[in-house]
Amino acid sequence: MWISIGSTCLFPLLSYAGSTSLNAVGAGFKGSTGLFIVPTAEVMEYGRLGFSFNNFLLSGYPADAEAQNYYVSAGVWEGLEIQIGLNDIHPQGADPYKYLDFYKRDLVGNFKYSHRLSALDPRLRVAIGGQDIAGTVVYSQLFYGVATFTDNFGSFSLGYATDAESTLNHTKPENLHHLFGGVSLNLPYGFTAIAEYDGTNQRAGIGYSSPNLFGSGIGFNLRASLLNDRQDEDQVISAGFSVPLGRERDEVFSSESEFVHRDVSPSMPNESTARYQADEQQLKEFPAAEPVAGVNKEEYDLLVAELEKSGLQYVEIASQGDTLYVRYQNRLFDWSEIDALAQVIALVSPYAYARQIPNLVIDVLSEQNPVVRISLASLWGMKGRQTPHAFSSDKPRYFEPHFEQVNAFSRQPIPLRNGAKRTELFSVKLEPKIVNTIGTEFGAFDYSLGIETEVSAELWTGARLSINRVDVLHNSYNFESGGHFDDYALNSGFQQAVLQQTLVPFDGFVNTLSFHQSLSDSDSKSIVDQWRYYAFDGRHQLYGYGAYNWKNDLSGNQDNDYYGFGGYELYWPEKGLSFSIEHGKYLDQDRTTKVGVKSYIGDSFFRASLMRESSGYEKAYVGFTVPLTPKKAIAVRGMTIRGESKWSYGTQTMTDNPANASGNINIGDSRYKAFGFYVSQPYEPHDAVMDSGRLTPVYLRSKKAYLKALVDGFQSETVPEM
């Protein structure tokens, strides 16, 4: 039997490109956007996630061979798309869980970067790309360049591909060789006629695409190759769909406000341009606050009740002179803290403006710790585009919002009035949990699927107690008892209890110390400390992680170990990007350096990282994070029921293996215990306390136009689309 196993992954470099237009996946048989085999210079739209399937079979396989090819595609940035795919070629009727019962099984990675040549003429684009790149085993690695001219009649593409390289002793594939080209002609009702030459073979067929299927926002694409000049190539079908994850909000709403000023240089802090400046010390050192004449306790209580009803807790309001002070903690707005802030401004601004109070100062709490302060004019928070002007007596210190970091020891302008009310007694969070393998010699796709439930409650300021359990829903064959991956399978039962203390001792510094007690069969304990410093308003971030474990081995002997790492992250929210590098000793006591990049798309993000262990092993990871929860959690009296707002999934694979051991075990859970990763924790301060960096001045400034649009939307009871 002819057997081939491959494993690759992707780590592209990011560059700037112009806007793109494809909503449908548009995937060809090799996964990239294109015709059939021939790629075009078009790419997926930034912010879309796509899935496609085809049954294209390379030449040279036995007559009983059939192919099943699966691809996950993503427009991770303007002009840049990536694909991760599984090519599975096997005999007809093969058992997908039988050891080595296939001809070829290969995890492949593709990328393509496209650029529009002229801003005045969007019809001509050029692109460079790679297929089946960067792995310990590759079957047909090649790189190409292509140009595409698009008009109302359709498109024409012409390109050149390098010779395909293979680490195996197989004949190099015939497809996409040197000079290639193709044409697509538009037909009525979304259909297209397609013809191409891939450098060796010719084929023709028909396609159909809809960028907005039935008004759902889902893109759909279908391709069928009907004619070809290769004797052993059958008619082939490719189908795919894509879903939008959102766009960077400042790009969507930058036209909404004439007051927006951005500097997109990552080295510049981009301060707000204020119409009315005030002494910085005056803003930080507030006088003792008392209600002003004409504002009574009953009015305060009504406004506090309205804010609590909207989804907030620990709400306090006070006024002094020309300023109204507000402090709150988000309870129900699960996707983003900026939604909660917009709700506060939308409710409080009309209240202050009607009473001739020009200034608002809002402190945002997280885990009962103040982390960021917003100062603005109450007039800015009124619906519509406003122009700053003098009130009857006082002028606002700031017209547009001004953002600054605060800490647990900052002087607070709000006096406690019988204590701030806590509306959430405990939280119940539900999320799917999956561990899976992709493209191994034991199976094309194996998985252990369960649901994780976490119950947590705040204790005192910064303290939280949580207990989580997992209930297994289903295990595939190789994850069942006695299967090859049964050691990695999920187990039903309580997992661990965690007691943690979060503190913000000075501006921009968040530290969480936690104690973890295992509740499963494995009796282990650990102490974990996580910290992150958001320097320069959050633009530059330093972070660290350290843990000490006590665990009994199978013989009952205590096995203690320590692991930890430190890193740096450059946060560039104006472009929706961040870059990081870290180094440390991980769970398997290896020393690993990891570099990574994130592309933020609304409330989701894509992540890619490359890890290299000191002895030469190397792994790559590609994944995405999405909110698997309603935009607002469900409140049932003192209980909050929610999903996971930052649910992560991805795949990692070996890209360099000096021992030449099997590099084909691709675990599809970002929390898998392998080198370059650490044990799963139910709580990460960067995500839970700082909303993945979105409670920093540098992020909030870059989203000022979206914030204004959200405020107007809440006041109109319609929230703008992302």
Image: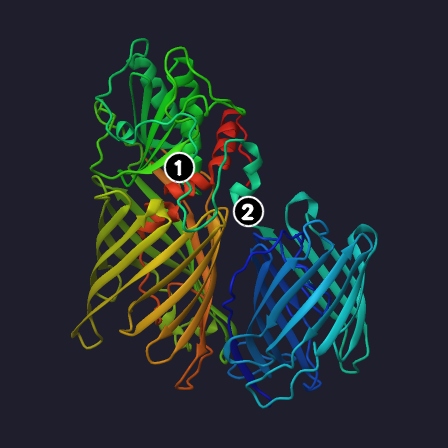
Q: Position of residue 537 (x, y in %)?
A: 35, 44
For mark 1, give the secondary structure.
loop
Residue with the mark numbered 2: 247
Q: Residues within 10 Å of mark 2 (few under 14, many from 20)?
A: many
The residue located at (41%, 85%) in the rendering is 661
Q: Quadrant of residue 148?
A: bottom right
Type of amino acid under label 1: Leu
Residue with the mark numbered 1: 332
Question: Residue furthest toward the left?
Answer: 557
Type of amino acid under label 2: Arg
Q: Quadrant of residue 399?
A: top left
The residue located at (39%, 86%) in the rendering is 659
Q: Which quadrant of the figure contains the C terminus?
A: top right
Q: Nearer the viewer, mark 2 or mark 1?
A: 2
Question: Residue furthest toward the top?
Answer: 294
Position of 82 relative to 664 (above/below): above
Position of 444 relative to 340 (above/below): below
Q: Residues within 10 Å of mark 1 (few under 14, many from 20)?
A: many
**CA–CA distance between discs 2 and 1?**
23 Å
Between 696 and 8, the residue placed more toward the observer is 696
Q: Which quadrant of the figure contains the N terminus?
A: bottom right
